[in-house]
């Protein structure tokens, strides 16, 4: 099969590496890709959100499958355009992708399908939003209704924080159109985890679970980011619990979308809160997370391309999807200054040395390569250092040993990825 992978991040580098292990793959194209993916296939200079350009290229090259990485092209209708052109696409239609494109759409699906989630209200008037928070009190979670690249959620623990978020999103339009409407919901308490499943419209097949570390600072302090690290699987959320959450939260959503005439095909990412009352849905995303994908795919032992092809053909349950019982960790190295304005242009060396450690793989995101081969940092989240081992402690040790071999003066990273998970494992062992 000749395949087009869409995207340019570390998630796409990890997807490319997994696709290249498939005996079904004849040729891989990545649009636009990065210097890391260039070693696995042919990078194509087409932006990930250039739907017309992606489809035209796939048609011209007579490609068998389009694999979307990020959410933006899906919400812009990539799968619909592929269908019109007679191309297979392992992602949802624009209508089904509203699960990520609109918070209130997802909440409506939850209400219709009886999916446990936080109580919520939607507002288009900032004065009404302020009055609601004043009546309900804090904490409250304020979410831009539209797509905001992970920056549209504020957990307000004071009225001042809530009012500042309402002003920024709805009046100053800090997030553009995404903040035209605001969803305000109760603040759920518990452990947050991410659940992933392949879906072929009617069926859902468990991929697994991971736990992200969103804050820039150690101890979960500082500004929110796209994700500074992940562990898979999360302690205390075993396969039985994951399957239960799939039955409770994911399969009812699929059934509701079928009822609405917009079946979901692709990767469904459910952000969950494990509350005292059981798992509740925080949000849906319509693609792999980043860096969760890097940790999850490190544990994949079956053929990713075969699973994606089966998903498109409605044969998902025949895909033979298998993951190892190993623990995996991903630690993100970002440019100094991230998540504000990161330092760029610094030379990166030592990746080969890092990957000589057993179980380690380094995935690239915001990098560039000079004509002489010099690798440089070119943005915010630049590298994901991933490791697998039979225990989380060993995987964590390997990942941080690999980081010590990377020479990049501008790098910043959290030194506590996986610490909370290890503490949970130790508590469980004591019990």
Image: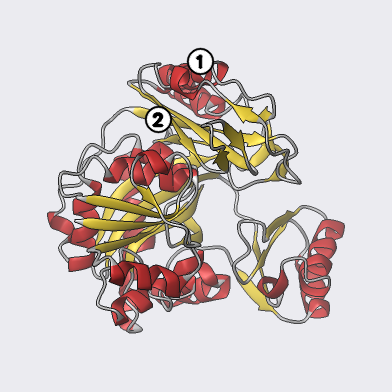
Residue 114, image quadrant: bottom left
Q: Give above or below for 110 relative to 246.
A: below
Q: Residue at position x 47%, y 50% from top?
A: 289
Q: Residue at position x 60%, y 54% from top?
A: 188
Q: Of 103 and 240, which appears nearest the observer?
A: 103
Q: Of 211 and 50, which appears nearest the observer?
A: 50
- Position of 14 compared to 22: left or right? right
Q: Position of residue 138 (x, y in %)?
A: 76, 58
Q: Of 77 and 199, which appears nearest the observer?
A: 77
Q: Of 143 and 311, which appears nearest the observer?
A: 311
**Quadrant of the drawing holding the N terminus:** bottom left
Q: Position of residue 67 (x, y in %)?
A: 34, 59
* Residues at circles 1 and 2 in contact by the CB criterion of under 8 Å: no
Q: Give above or below for 366 relative to 279.
A: above
Spatial CA span between label 1 and label 2: 15 Å
User: Badge 2: few (under 14), some or many (20 or more) residues near its Cα, within 10 Å?
Assistant: many
User: Badge 1: few (under 14), some or many (20 or more) residues near its Cα, within 10 Å?
Assistant: some
Q: Position of residue 140 (x, y in %)?
A: 71, 60
Q: Position of residue 93 (x, y in %)?
A: 38, 75
- Position of 97 compared to 246: left or right? right
Numbered marks: total: 2
| Residue farthest along the front direction in this orientation | 372
Q: Earlier in the sequence, mark 1 or mark 2?
A: 2
The answer to whether one can see residue 101 in this image is: yes
Residue identifier under label 2: 328
The answer to whether one can see residue 213 in this image is: no
| Residue farthest along the right direction in this orientation | 160
Residue identifier under label 1: 401
Give the secondary structure at mark 2: strand
Comparing labels 1 and 2, the label whose residue is closer to the camera? 1
| Residue farthest along the left direction in this orientation | 318
Residue 328, image quadrant: top left
């Amino acid at each position: 099969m000749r395949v087009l992978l869409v995207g340019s991040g570390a998630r796409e580098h990890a997807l490319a590496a997994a696709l290249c292990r498939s005996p079904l793959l004849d040729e891989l194209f990545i649009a636009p890709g990065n210097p890391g993916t260039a070693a696995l296939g042919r990078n194509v200079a087409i932006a990930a959100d250039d739907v017309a350009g992606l489809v035209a290229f796939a048609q011209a090259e007579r490609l068998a499958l389009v694999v979307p990485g990020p959410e933006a092209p899906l919400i812009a209708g990539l799968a619909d355009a592929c269908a019109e052109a007679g191309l297979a696409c392992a992602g949802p239609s624009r209508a089904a992708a509203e699960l990520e494109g609109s918070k209130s759409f997802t909440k409506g699906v939850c209400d219709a399908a009886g999916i446990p989630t936080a109580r919520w209200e939607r507002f288009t008037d900032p004065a009404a939003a302020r009055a609601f928070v004043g009546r309900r009190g804090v904490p409250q979670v304020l979410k831009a209704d539209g797509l905001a690249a992970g920056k549209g959620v504020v957990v307000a623990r004071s009225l001042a924080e809530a009012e500042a978020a309402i002003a920024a999103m709805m009046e100053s339009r800090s997030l553009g159109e995404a903040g035209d409407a605001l969803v305000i919901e109760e603040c759920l308490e518990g452990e947050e985890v991410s659940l992933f499943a392949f879906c072929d419209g009617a069926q859902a097949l468990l991929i697994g679970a991971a736990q992200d570390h969103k804050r820039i600072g150690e101890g979960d302090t500082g500004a929110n980011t796209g994700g500074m690290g992940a562990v898979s699987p999360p302690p205390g959320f075993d396969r039985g619990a994951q399957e239960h959450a799939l039955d409770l939260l994911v399969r009812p959503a699929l059934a509701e979308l079928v009822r609405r005439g917009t079946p979901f095909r692709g990767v469904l990412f459910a952000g969950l809160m494990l509350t005292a009352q059981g798992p509740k849905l925080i949000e849906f995303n319509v693609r792999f997370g980043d860096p969760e994908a890097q940790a999850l795919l490190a544990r994949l032992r079956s053929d990713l391309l075969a699973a994606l092809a089966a998903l498109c053909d409605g044969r998902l349950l025949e895909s033979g999807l298998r993951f190892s019982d190993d623990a995996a960790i991903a630690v993100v190295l970002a440019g100094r200054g991230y998540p504000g304005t990161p330092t760029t242009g610094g030379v990166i060396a030592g990746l080969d040395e890092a990957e000589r450690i057993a179980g380690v793989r380094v995935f690239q995101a915001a990098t560039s390569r000079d004509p002489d081969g010099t690798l440089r940092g070119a943005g915010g989240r630049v590298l994901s250092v991933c490791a697998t081992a039979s225990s989380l402690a060993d995987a964590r040790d390997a990942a941080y040993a690999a980081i010590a071999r990377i020479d990049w003066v501008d790098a910043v990273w959290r030194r506590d990825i996986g610490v909370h998970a290890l503490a949970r494992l130790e508590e469980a062992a004591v019990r």
